Amino acid sequence: MIDVCCAIIVREDGCVFVAQRAANQSLPFKFEFPGGKLEANESPRDCVLREVKEELNLDICIVSEQMPVSYNYPAFSIKLIPFVCRITGGTLVLKEHHSGKWVAPKNLLDLDWAAADVPVVKAYLAANL
């Protein structure tokens, strides 16, 4: 089981940032919330702050934490630990993803998500719509 933290970054207008995985990554071109693997001796909160800075060049603050989701892909299993966040600084730069965009919550489920992210999207929508 791989622990992965992800950021549901919400703009003041309510739109949510989503990232599309690169062609050379596992699950190519699937949408996901940005984030990454929890490192040894790192808290989930520190992980999500670090990963967003590394992947997107953004500083964020955590607004709330959602329930973790476990998902078994054919080749690996992850526990996805989601945090609802806001941007506090930095300039958005895609360093690892194919693309990224801001999406209105009502349109989130229209995207082709990585399977582990789907329950996270649904939980976010249930709590925020």
Image: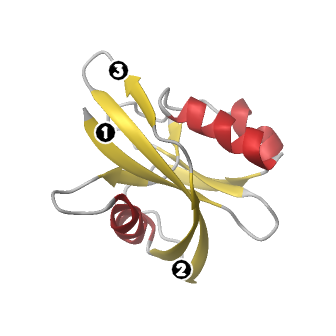
As helix, strand or loop, the secondary structure at mark 1 comes to loop
- Give the CA distance from mark 2 to mark 1: 25 Å
First in sequence: mark 3 vs mark 1: 1
Q: Furthest residue to the top?
A: 74
The amino acid at mark 3 is Tyr
Q: Which residue is mark 2?
A: 91
Q: Amino acid at mark 1?
A: Asn
Quarter of the image containing the C terminus? Answer: top right
Neighbours of disc 3 within 10 Å: few (<14), some (14-19), many (20+):
few
Q: Which mark is residue 73?
A: 3
Q: Are marks 3 and 1 in contact (CB under 8 Å)?
A: no
Is 20 in front, or is 74? 74
- Looking at the image, is mark 2 or mark 3 nearer the viewer? 3
- Sequence-wise first label, 2 or 1: 1
Residue 81, how many percent across, how many down?
44, 47
The scheme the figure's colours follow is secondary structure
Q: Position of residue 117 (x, y in %)?
A: 52, 35
Q: Which mark is residue 8?
A: none
Identified at 30% across, 15% down, the residue is: 74
Q: Quadrant of residue 73?
A: top left
Dot 2 and dot 3 residues touching (CB under 8 Å): no
Alpha carbon separation for disc pair 2 and 3:
33 Å
* Element under disc 2: loop
Q: Is residue 12 left or right of residue 83?
A: right
Disc 2 residue type (three-letter):
Thr
Rendering quarter of residue 2: top left
Instruction: Tell me residue 14's x, y (percent).
Output: 79, 60
Question: Local crowd at mark 1 within 10 Å, few (<14), some, or many (≥20)?
Answer: few
Q: Which mark is residue 24?
A: 1
Taking 90 as reference, is 29 above or below it? above
Q: Which residue appears at 54% of the width and 74% of the height? A: 61
